[in-house]
Amino acid sequence: MRRIGIDVGGTNTDAVLLDGDRVERAVKTATTADVTTGIVAALRRLLADAEPGARRVDAVMIGTTHFTNAVVQRRDLTPVAAVRIGLPASASLEPFVDWPADLAALVRGGIHMVEGGHEVDGRPIVPFDEPAMRRAARQIRASGVRSVAVSAIFSPIDPADEQRAGAILAEECPGVAVTLSHELGRIGLLERENACLLNACLVELARRTTRAFTEALAGSGLDAPLYLTQNDGTVTLASQAEAFPVYSFASGPTNSMRGAAFLSRLDEAIVVDVGGTTTDVGCLRHGFPREANAVVEVGGVRTLFRMPDLLSIALGGGTLVEPHPLTIGPRSVGFRLTEEALVFGGPTLTCTDLAAAAGLVALGDPARVAHLPRGLVAAGIRAMHERIAEAVDRMKTDAGDVPVIAVGGGSFLVPPSMPGVSQVIRVAHHPVANAVGAAIAQISGELDQVFQNMTREAAIAQAQRLAEERAVRGGARRETLKVVEVEDIPLAYLPGNSLRARVRVVGDIARR
Amino acid sequence: MDDRPRPVTLEEIEQLAIGAWILGTGGGGSPYHGLLNMRTLYARGTVVRLLDPAALADDDDVAVVSFMGAPLVSQERFKDPRTIARAVRMMEEYTGRRFRAVMAVEIGGGNGIVPFMAAALLDIPVVDADAMGRAFPEAQMTSFAIKDLPCAPLTLADVRDNGVIVARAASWKWMERLSRKACTEVGSTAATCKAPRTGKDVKEAAILYTTTKAIRLGATVQAARRAHRDPIGAILAAEGGRLLFRGKVRDVARRTTEGFLRGTARLEGLDEHAGQGFELAFQNEWAVGWHDGEPRVTTPDLICVVDSVSGEAIGTETLRYGQRVSVIVLPAPPILLTPKGLEHVGPRAFGYDLDFRSVFAEAAR
């Protein structure tokens, strides 16, 4: 199988061509404001002087931080009508209640509260008020808002009211984009609703971006299905993924961790990705990033959706070094490294300069850092090593020694050995690990649900069956599916031996 | 003493939310939604007043309120100020007497803010007191029960306008069973107004000034964070607490039995505790701690597990592998340390065959 992986980051657009398990080519280009131009440029260089036959690829996978950046930078967002189904319950905290005021002002396009929703044990709170839902749909249509977020109380346990609301909206407001909260997530109405609202305000941008990706592909003469990478290290067909931009929020760091796993052939390890400004440390379990279980904030909005558990520290190749007293960071010269750093003839002392002076990396002109006092260099390197070692230790999942995979342009800052680490592995193509991670992505299916009056084994088996169905619907080949994560949490106070089970399966993309 | 209730600012309620979560000793649920409710109410111009318990007349009536149920359910069905106000009104109709003020049954966790939600709608002040000085899992674990005050009547309200009155109960245990049953029926979350107390009862049997204490605790944490000082050191200095252990979470085992979240957590020492271990047992709240296998701290001393950097409290439901935490202990209210108090809330009340030895008594020796 020949696949192209592309990672569209804030600074660079990286692309790799994979033939089976071999990295055939890798390129790095600058990200452009319109995204498309950068991708076209990357593809042109990737496929330059390739035989016509070599243009044949089976799939193209794109990972992007475009949607996160839109929220963080408050641009390209669509107004959203919020429909909450659950009255008379939960009325005191309305949708958008804990959003930053500036973001809420941009996105809030009307709030509609409707009777309905479910109890934790599956009974209706009150019957779903369909006539009220229809009135809300007509108001939305009259208001001209083009995207709707629907969240019902305990919809992860019973999604019927959200589904019925979606059908009514389709009838009354043809062409309006609808996001249903149960498709996004977990128990915790406010956080799930926030994820749903964020998704709804990005849907239009996602459609536009996906179309731009498709055109970039066509313009490069490639005829292959396009997939978008997801927060969990898997991919979805772009035509389906464009409905769920929030699932791509964290795909950048995820792809770099998946790429590290692939390039090192290790499934259980800590990955240290050193960029220009930050170092991201994550934990690989079964070849996938461990997910965060807690509240994750995006652009100031609390959400609970699937994100890798990452520890970011302000340390990278471009991080500023202050000699007296020795201070490292948190500021960085970022992508201006090759103009600013001493070793490249610039005026600023950075971590890269210390590494070059210590002989850890051959970059620029070593004579320009030869004057740095040896004591300063040694103390600076020691301080950086300690910060990375501390971050690695924080992310470890058990007390035993684990391997560390060092990737990213600044990975020469990772110490050769650390306490609690069996070995530090440096791999070929590590600067484009993220694009490699995109190229190798598989299809996943996940289920997170509360089960009652079932044994633990029966509940997990049921969850696995439902997760597998979801993966197959997403384009996975059934016979390649395997379980990558099982988690169960018994729930306090609830009747009937309640258990929340979460199962995730992945499989290869079905050949077309 | 000031007879007039004083207005409470929204900033103080933000501080109350931080302090109440720490005093929750691992249980009681996060006060986050309660805080959001108060922000919304204050944005509409509401101001809640706080009443010094000494200003209560002996024959004043005080409503004791809390939300009952599963923390998970309140993540979907939010605690609603109107429901808690309805439970209080129902009690007034039942007894035929008007309440002078409202107070918390437990200051720890989400219930620490609930009287403020009720007070905002009922336009009566909140009494600066509660009946636990922390959070506990069961109805008989209050200072009112320790002082043998009556456990009934109780009113219970849900958001659909269902109302239940438990007119009589043979014991605190029966009150727990009957009200728990009703609570489960209405969806495992319900507003309750416990047995009304007189001003005299409150002055003699409640734990006084705990609202102020929670606000002060939150203010201490906030000030330390703003000044980039160690919030844990600040808590210990301000409240006369002690640091027992600093480490990272190595293992958490949870199970649900008889409607409670029970389990154990093991910590591995860091810094001055490197190479040592600490184990915690919990029943909704932290109950007992062992340092290298030796019992070190037990309920009712306040066992608080906080994030080692931010000082933010960590609940028994949210503790997870790898977190850097500090175990600190704060002094328990004296009434809980009496022989009768220990019968209700000492280690044996939680099934541990251990004698209570306060961390602070030992420090004094």
Image (cartoon, coloured by chain):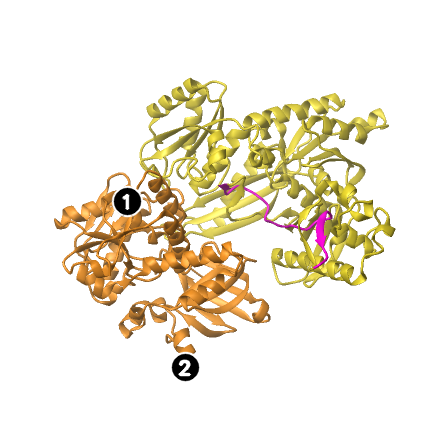
Residue B340 shown in magenta: no
Say which chain tag 1 marks: B
Q: Give the labeled residue for mark 1.
A: B120
Asked if A322 appears above or below A52 in the picture, the reply is below
Q: Residues within 10 Å of mark 2 (few under 14, many from 20)?
A: few
Residue A55: image quadrant is top right
Residue A305 shown in magenta: yes
Q: Give x and y (percent) for residue A418.
A: 71, 61
Q: Is residue A507 left or right of residue B202?
A: right
| Chain coloured orange | B
The kind of residue on which mark 2 rests is Arg
Q: Which of the numbered marks, if any, corresponds to residue B365? A: 2
Q: Is residue B226 left or right of residue B115?
A: right
Q: Earlier in the sequence, mark 1 or mark 2?
A: 1
Quadrant containing the C terminus of chain A is top right
Q: Give x and y (percent) for residue A69.
A: 60, 35
Secondary structure under badge 1?
A: helix
Quadrant containing the N terminus of chain A is top right
The kind of residue on which mark 1 rests is Ala
Residue B59: image quadrant is bottom left
Q: Is residue B135 visible?
A: no
Say which chain tag 2 marks: B
Q: Give x and y (percent) for residue B222.
A: 46, 55
Secondary structure under badge 2?
A: loop
Give the residues in magenta. A301-324
Q: Give x and y (percent) for residue A488.
A: 49, 51
In the image, what residue occupies the spot 29% across and 69% down? B335
Chain A on-screen colour: yellow
